[in-house]
Image (cartoon, rainbow, N blue to C red):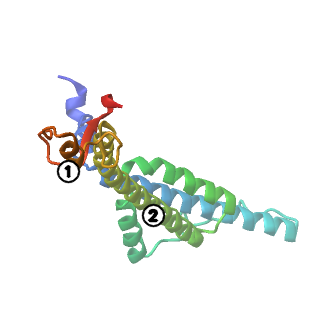
């Protein structure tokens, strides 16, 4: 008997396959958000310790015990962020994380400001995906219109209408010559293919 059946090592693989891509995106982005909040708190504590060292000249950092996680996002704000994360397409998940990390590294925000940065990155990604959808929709519409205009232009290039060409015979010419008129309706313009030119 295999040990994996006793410990259920195969269970996470089946559990992962049951989740939808949207759930995985939400979970991944929210984990990144939580991690960045913890890092912001850690950096804030380090800055405070450095300030105390400079101010007092003595390092008492080893005496101070900090709570592991002091800042917490309100449930309403968390739900709003999760809702925004659910609107992110899976292909944008990586770029959103990269952009979020760049902004955090650039601004070095405190823990409450991380939420605003994360919200702005999500909003930018949602707007960008909407713009790309609109562009694809316009491209599809243009392509369908363009295909019909191509078929009309190829028809126009093959057949030319020449109502005023000089070699068109008129009824009066035939009457003057006393010949039979050709079997064509004289009020209609003459259609010629491009081979005749």
Q: Name which residue lies at 36% across and 61% down.
A: 87
State which quarter of the image contains the C terminus: top left
User: Residue 142: horizontal and vertical position, in percent?
Assistant: 35, 52
Tag of residue 188: 1
Question: Mark 2, residues whose alpha carbon is within 10 Å: few (<14), some, or many (≥20)?
Answer: few
Taking the image as shown, residue 122 lies to the left or right of residue 52, namely: left
Is 186 or 96 nearer to us in this picture?
A: 186
Residue bearing mark 2 = 127
Q: Is residue 132 above or below residue 159?
A: below
Tag of residue 54: none
Q: Name which residue lies at 31% across and 52% down.
A: 145
In this view, the mark in front (2 or 1) = 1
State which quarter of the image contains the N terminus: top left
User: Residue 27: horizontal and vertical position, in percent?
Assistant: 37, 55
Marks 1 and 2: in contact by CB < 8 Å? no
User: Residue 22: horizontal and vertical position, in percent?
Assistant: 31, 54
Is 98 or 172 nearer to us in this picture?
A: 172
At mark 1, the secondary structure is: loop
Is 5 or 27 nearer to us in this picture?
A: 27
| Alpha carbon distance from label 2 to label 1 | 56 Å
Query: Furthest residue to the top?
Result: 1
Taking the image as shown, residue 103 lies to the left or right of residue 188, namely: right
Q: Is residue 49 above or below residue 183?
A: below
Taking the image as shown, residue 15 lies to the left or right of residue 135, namely: left
Q: Name which residue lies at 42% across and 55% down.
A: 132
Question: Mark 1, residues whose alpha carbon is within 10 Å: few (<14), some, or many (≥20)?
Answer: few
Is 129 or 25 nearer to us in this picture?
A: 129
On the question of residue 61 being in view, the answer is yes
Count the marks: how many? 2
Image quarter of residue 116 = bottom right
Q: In terms of sequence position, does the residue under pointer 2 or pointer 1 come before the other? A: 2
């Amino acid at each position: 008997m295999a040990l994996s059946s006793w410990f259920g090592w195969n269970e996470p693989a089946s559990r992962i396959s049951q989740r939808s891509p949207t759930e995985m995106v939400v979970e991944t982005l929210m984990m990144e958000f939580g991690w960045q909040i913890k890092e912001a708190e850690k950096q804030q504590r380090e800055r405070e310790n450095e300030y105390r060292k400079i101010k007092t000249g003595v390092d008492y950092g080893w005496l101070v015990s900090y709570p592991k996680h002091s800042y917490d996002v309100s449930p309403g704000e968390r739900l709003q962020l999760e809702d925004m994360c659910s609107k992110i397409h899976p292909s944008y998940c990586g770029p959103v994380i990269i952009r979020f990390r760049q902004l955090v590294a650039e601004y070095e925000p405190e823990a409450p400001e991380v939420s605003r940065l994360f919200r702005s990155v999500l909003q930018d990604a949602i707007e960008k995906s909407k713009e790309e959808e609109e562009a694809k929709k316009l491209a599809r519409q243009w392509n369908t219109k363009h295909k019909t205009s191509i078929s009309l232009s190829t028809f126009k290039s093959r057949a030319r209408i020449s109502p005023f060409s000089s070699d068109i015979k008129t009824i009066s010419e035939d009457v003057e010559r006393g010949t039979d008129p050709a079997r064509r309706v004289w009020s209609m313009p003459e259609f010629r293919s491009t081979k005749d030119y």
